[in-house]
Amino acid sequence: MNGSSDLLCCSDRLCCEAHSDNKVIQEQGDVIAAEGDTVTLDCKYETTSAFPYLFWYKQDVNDYPKYVLRRDASGTENAQEFPKDRFDAELNKTSVSLKIQKLQLSDSAVYYCALRPTVTGNSKTLYKNLWSKDNRILHNIH
């Protein structure tokens, strides 16, 4: 750190519910920290699965979410660009908080927690056709 007062803002406010049995809750809101600091972003979850898979994603402004890491009972995985010595998470029975160490300005982003089923590590464009009941294309989404 060069003595400047650069700040890092991380927003992790999100609550998603895919099925009534599975829920991810991020209530913390914005986090403000200085370059070089360590922050922890909270993520609570509820699931009926005995072996849940939890994921963290990072979304920069005007960009798609990027896969950061996965935690489950059988092991851990970090994406190559998010090394475990800076990006880590510990899976507990009801939470999987993300710990980011040695903060850099490039860490400023929105961070999402997700509970399996989800898609990881695919940065290709999604193409989907929406069909009507009589098999006519209604929309082609890119």
Image (cartoon, rainbow, N blue to C red):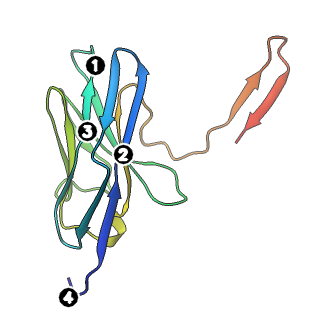
How many numbered marks, from 0 up? 4
The tag earlier along the polypeptide, 4 or 3, is 4
Q: Where does residue 132 sit, x and y in percent of width and height?
A: 80, 17
Say which residue label 2 marks: 13
Residue drawn at point x = 49 percent, y = 60 percent: 61
Give the numbered dot on residue 3: 4
Number of residues whose C-alpha sits closer than 10 Å to that of mark 4, classed few (under 14), some (14–19) or many (20 or more): few
- Dots 2 and 4: beta carbons under 8 Å? no
- Image quadrant holding the N terminus, namely bottom left
Residue at mark 4 to residue at mark 1: CA–CA distance = 45 Å
Q: Where does residue 114 sit, x and y in percent of width and height?
A: 36, 35
Residue drawn at point x = 79 percent, y = 32 percent: 139
The tag earlier along the polypeptide, 2 or 3, is 2
Q: Quadrant of residue 124?
A: top right
Residue at mark 1 to residue at mark 3: CA–CA distance = 13 Å
Mark 3 falls on what kind of element?
Answer: loop
- Dots 2 and 3: beta carbons under 8 Å? no
Question: What residue type is disc 3 on?
Answer: Cys
- Dots 4 and 1: beta carbons under 8 Å? no
Residue at mark 2 to residue at mark 3: CA–CA distance = 9 Å
Residue drawn at point x = 36 percent, y = 68 percent: 106
Mark 4 falls on what kind of element?
Answer: loop
Residue at mark 2 to residue at mark 1: CA–CA distance = 19 Å
Q: Does 114 sit left or right of 136 as displayed?
A: left
Give the numbered dot on residue 39: none
Residue at mark 4 to residue at mark 3: CA–CA distance = 32 Å
Q: Quadrant of residue 104?
A: bottom left
Residue drawn at point x = 61 percent, y = 44 percent: 125
Say which residue label 1 marks: 47
